Amino acid sequence: MAHPNSDIIPTVDGLAYGGDYNPEQWPREVWDEDVRLMREAGVNLVSVNIFAWAGINPGPGVWDFERLDAIMDLLAEGGVKADLATSTASPPPWFSQRHPETLPVDAEGRRLNYGARAEYCPHAPVFQAAVVEMATRLAERYADHPALAMWHVGNEYYRWCYCDAAADAFRVWLEERHGDLDGLNRAWGTTFWSQTFTDWSQVLPPRISAETPSPGHVLDWQRFGSDALLKLFRSEADAIARRSGKPITTNLMVTGNFSRLDYHRWGEHVTGPGRLVATDHYLIPEHDDDIEAPAQVAFGADASRGLAGGSPWLLMEQSTNSSAWRGGYFAKQPGDQLRHSLSYVARGSEGAMYFQWRASRYGTERWHSSMITHGGTDSKVWREVVEFGGWLKRLAEVKGSTVVSRAAILLDFESAWAAATPGQPSADMATYPEIRRWHAALWRKGVTTDLVNPEWDLNGYEYVFAPHLYVLESDANLRAYVESGGTLVVGPYSGIVDRDDHVHEGLPGALRDLIGVRVEEFCPLPKGATITLDDGTEGHTWSEAAHPTTAEVVASFTDYPATGAIFHRHLGKGQIWYLSTRPTDLATFLTNIGLQSDTPETLELVTRRHEDGRTYLFAINHGQTPTPIPAEGQNLLTGTPWTRTDHLQPGASAVIRIA
Ligand code: GLA
C-alpha cells in the first residue's frame, strides 16, 4: 500500500532527535551551551514556543518577537531545526483576567481560575479569535525562517467546558447531527424518565444533575467536545497552511486511555498532505501493572502508527526517566532509554523526541526527567542520550520506510466512550485496558499489531482482534474480511448497540449472524472472580449464556451459565472465534488459534520496509540471555555484518539491513 505521508518532515536530515526546548526559562548564556550540547548529542529538531504566549504577546495589542527571533536564529546557526509551536495551549494571566469568559467552566458550574495551563474555553469567541491571530502572526513572521521544519499547533488538546457558550455550540452541533428536535429526542431516547425536549433552549451540556445522566446525552457530548477541539485546531492549522508549506501537526496523546478525543475523526486533518501524526507517550507503571514496560512502549507506538494509517509518524514526547505528574518517581534501568526509544523507531516513528531538553529549575515540572537532568551531563541519562543520537544518525536510511504488521486490533473511540456511559451491566467492562491486555499478549508472541478503526480496510491482516467493540452498526466490513480469508477474534459484549447507544434487537446485535452465536443473557462476574471452562482455562469479569446457531462450541463454562464460552466458525475462506468471557490466559488462547512463537517473549523483532524492498529487522533483547537472530545482513548500529548464527546479547539491540 502506498503511504500518503512517507516523508513527513522533509527538511530534517535523517531521523529526528530532540525534545521540547524552553530557553525562555534560562539566561542567554545557557542557550549557547544548549546548542553546543545539542550538537554533541546529535539533536536536529526541537519544539519551541509551546508555552511562550506571555512573552510574545505580553499585553493587549502588544507584540514582541525579539526573543523568539533570537531563538530561531540561534537554532538556524547551530544547524538545529524547529518544530515551532503556536503557544496557544496556555493563555497568560492578562488574557484570562481581561476576558474571564474564556476561562473554562466545569460540570458543576464553577468557573475555574487561571494559574496553570490550558485554561480556556474552546467555545469562547474571544479565545477562538486570539488563537487564529497568534497562528497568523507566527506564520507570517517565520514561514521562511531557515530553522523552521514544522508547525506545532496548541499542545495536547483535551480541554472541555460546560459554560453557556458551550451550550450554544452544542445545540448547533446537535441540530447538524440529528436534523431537528424530534431527531434529538429519538437519538437520546428522551421518553425515558420523561425528558422530552420541546425547545432547543432546554438542551444543556451534561452538567451535574440529581440523578444519572442519559447515556445518549453523555455520548454526544463526548463527540461534540472532540469535534469542537478539532475545529479549534483546524482554525490555527488553516491559518498557517495559507501562509506556509511546512508540515503542520499537534501532539496527540496515546498514553493509557488516550485523551478524550476521537482521533479517527481528526483523520485527514492530522494525516492528510502536509500534516503528520505526532504523539506523546509516557509509561505509567501502576496503570498497567501487569504489562511490562517494553510492551507498553510497543502499545504507544502501534497506536500511533494506527492513527497515521500505517504511515510513518513522530514520537513527539517521551521521558528519559520519571514523569513528574505521576505522583512518584521511578528510574529507568540502564539501557531502557535506548531500548524504548529504538522500539518506537522500529514501530514507525521517524525519530525520538522527549519532554524536555533541559530540566526546568522551577515550576510544576521541575522534577520531570529530561535529556539534560539536574544531575548534569556526567550522568547515565546524558550518556544514553548521546549514544542514542549516534544510533539515529546511523539509521538515517530507515526514514520513510513502513512497518510490516501481521495482525490488527480494532479500536473505536466512540465505542470505548459508549461502553463507559452510565448504567452498564458491568462497570468493569472497560475497553482500553482490555485492548492493551490483548496487545501485550500479542507483543509477547512477537506479533506486530496495528491498532485500526473497524471500518478501515482490513484485508492483508492474517488476524484481526476485536476485544471489545460495544458499538457496531453493521458487520459488513468484518464479514468481508473473514470471507476473503482472514481470522477474526471477537471478545464479549461486542456488537451490542448502534451509534446512538440503542440496544440492537437480539443479542449480540450486529454480530449475531456473523459469529453464529445467540446470547440469551449477560452474567457479569464480581470483581476479581473467575469462571472455569471445561478446557481447563478461566475467564474473568464477564460471562454470557450463549448458544451456537451456526458456530461450534469449542469450550463451555463448567458452572452457571453452563453454556458455550468459546465458539468457532468457518465462513468463506476465513474463520471466526467468539469468546463469551474475557480469557484470563490470553497466551494459551493465542497458541490454540495458531499463534505459537519460537522466540523468547523478551526478544522484540519488528520489520520496517521501503517501497523499493529495502528491509530492516529491528531486534531488541529485553531479556537476560543471549538470543540468536537468524538473519543475514548489516547491523546498522555497529556497521558490522550480521550472520545467521550471531546472538544478540542481553539488553543489546541490532538493526539489520537484510541482505
Ligand atoms: C505532556 C505535555 C508537556 C509536559 C509533559 C510532561 O505531554 O505536552 O508539556 O507537561 O506532558 O510529561
Image (cartoon, grey):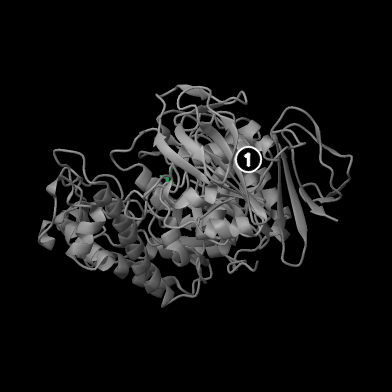
Residue drawn at (57%, 36%), measured in percent from left and top?
566
Look at mark 1 in the image and give the residue it sits on. Answer: 442
Q: Position of residue 426 (x, y in %)?
A: 36, 33
Q: Position of residue 243 (x, y in %)?
A: 42, 77
Q: Do we see residue 377 in this rendering?
A: no
Q: Position of residue 249 (x, y in %)?
A: 46, 62
Q: Do we see residue 448 in this rendering?
A: yes
Residue drawn at (50%, 31%), measured in percent from left and top?
563
Using residue 429 as the reference point, say whether residue 600 is left or right of it.
right
| Mark 1 residue type | Leu
Q: Residues within 10 Å of mark 1 (few under 14, many from 20)?
A: many
Indicate which quadrant contains ligand 1. Answer: top left
* Figure quadrant of residue 538: top right
In the picture shown, does residue 457 fall above or below 414?
below
Q: Position of residue 284 (x, y in %)?
A: 48, 35
In the picture shown, does residue 32 fall above or below 291?
below
